[in-house]
Image: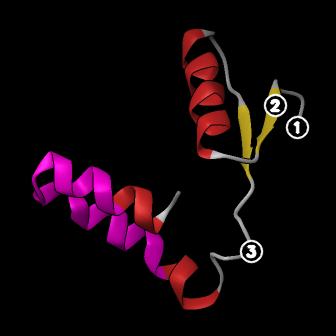
Amino acid sequence: MGVPSVRAHSTEEFVQALERALATPGPHLIEAMVPPSLSGLKLKMLPKILGSLDGLPQPVARFLKRKIAP
């Protein structure tokens, strides 16, 4: 794509890649590898589920996020 890019296989790698991208100017490409356990309906529902956690108390939301998308 002509821009700096990285492939993230885990949440930690994705966070590190995002921090690097935000710390440097210009566009960046981050390829987030989705584990095979997140397929079908679970994969389609994941963004909606994670988005709905914002209304929950922080400790509960963190616990659920770890269980849903480790």
Q: Is residue 39 above or below residue 61?
A: below
Report the mark closest to the observer, 1 or 3. 3
**Residue 28 in the figure: left or right of residue 61:** right
What percent of the width, then of the height, locates residue 7? 80, 41
Query: Does residue 49 appear left or right of residue 2 in this picture?
Result: left
Q: Residue furthest top?
A: 24
Residue 3 in magenta? no
Image quadrant of residue 53?
A: bottom left
Residue placed under numbered mark 2 in the picture: 5
**x, y percent for residue 48:** 36, 72
First-in-chain label (2 vs 3): 2
> Mark 2 and mark 1 in contact (Cβ < 8 Å)?
yes
Label 2 – label 3 distance at C-alpha:
22 Å
Determine the residue positioned at 75% across, 47% down: 9
Residue 16 % position (x, y): 62, 26
Q: CA distance from mark 1 to mark 2?
A: 8 Å
**Percent x, y of residue 41:** 54, 90
Q: Residue furthest bottom?
A: 41
Work out whether residue 52 or residue 60 is closer to the camera in this orientation and state it.
60
Question: Where 27 sits versus 63, above or below?
Answer: above
Q: Which residue is mark 1?
A: 1
Question: CB under 8 Å between callouts 1 and 3?
Answer: no
